[in-house]
């Protein structure tokens, strides 16, 4: 079966078909097509010697694990702390704790990478609402 390819100005095959291009495309488009070997596919490159080469293989996916997200939902956030710590934080009357809990309730998440979050957690440790060990566990 005959195969035809539209070879673009940069020499790259843009489209292939097995029907006579003059019968299925407007003349201006059909003029882009030429007969090619059956192995040619879109993305192949026409070389100066009129042969076609396959495009380079895509890079292999990284074997490195994706970076760990710094976003925690409410459940994940509170699960890092003891019941006593959760109670202390929820009963706190200072404005930083109230604002933090209001934002957590509003957003349902907390971003541990934000400096404001880091500062708030440090303040909660200083105020003895949370322990540093459990904050470290949250960040792990």
Image (tube, rainbow, N blue to C red):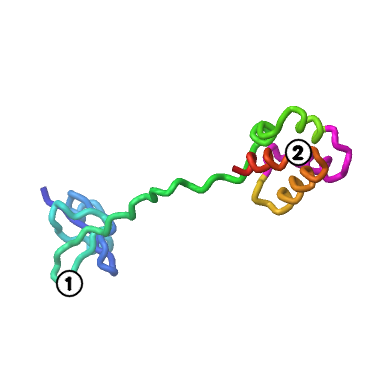
Tell me where residue 72 appears, x and y as whole percent.
64, 39
Which of 17 and 31 lies nearest the eye of the viewer?
17
Position of 60 compared to 98: left or right?
left
Position of 64 compared to 80: left or right?
left
Position of 51 compared to 73: left or right?
left
Q: Which picture quadrant has residue 130? A: top right
Q: Is residue 115 above or below residue 100?
A: below
Q: Which mark is residue 130?
A: 2
Question: Which element type, helix, strand or loop, lies under badge 1?
Answer: loop
Question: Which element type, helix, strand or loop, lies under badge 2?
Answer: loop
Tell me where residue 28 appears, x and y as whole percent.
27, 63
Q: Is residue 73 above or below residue 24?
A: above
Mark 2 nearby-residue class (10 Å; few <14, some 14–19, many ≥20): many
Tell me where residue 115 appears, x and y as whole percent.
71, 54
Q: Is residue 67 magenta?
A: no
Mark 1 nearby-residue class (10 Å; few <14, some 14–19, many ≥20): few
Which of 45 and 100 lies nearest the eye of the viewer?
100
Q: Which picture quadrant has residue 58? A: bottom left
Query: Cβ–Cβ below 8 Å for labels 1 and 2?
Result: no
Q: Residue at x 14, y 64 (%)?
A: 51
Position of 111 compared to 101: left or right?
left
Q: Is residue 107 magenta?
A: yes
Q: Residue at x 27, y 60 (%)?
A: 29
Q: Earlier in the sequence, mark 1 or mark 2?
A: 1
Main SS of the magenta part reads helix
Nearer to us of marks 1 and 2 is 2
Which of 108 and 10 lies nearest the eye of the viewer?
108
The residue labelled by disc 1 is 48
Q: Which stretch did the figure color magenta?
A: 91-110
Residue 22 can be seen in this image: no
Tell me where residue 132 appears, x and y as whole percent.
71, 42
Q: Residue at x 79, y 38 (%)?
A: 129
């Amino acid at each position: 079966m005959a195969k035809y390819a539209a070879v673009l100005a940069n020499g790259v095959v843009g489209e292939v078909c097995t029907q006579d291009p003059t019968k299925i495309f407007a003349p201006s488009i059909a003029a882009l097509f030429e007969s090619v070997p059956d192995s040619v596919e879109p993305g192949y490159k026409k070389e100066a010697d009129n042969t076609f080469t396959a495009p380079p293989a895509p890079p292999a996916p990284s074997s490195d694990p994706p970076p760990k997200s710094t976003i925690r939902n409410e459940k994940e956030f509170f699960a890092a702390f003891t019941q006593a710590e959760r109670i202390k934080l929820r009963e706190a009357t200072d404005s930083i704790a109230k604002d933090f809990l209001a934002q957590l309730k509003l957003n349902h998440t907390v971003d541990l990478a934000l400096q404001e979050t880091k500062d708030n957690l440090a303040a909660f440790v200083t105020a003895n609402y949370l322990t540093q060990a459990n904050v470290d566990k949250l960040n792990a």
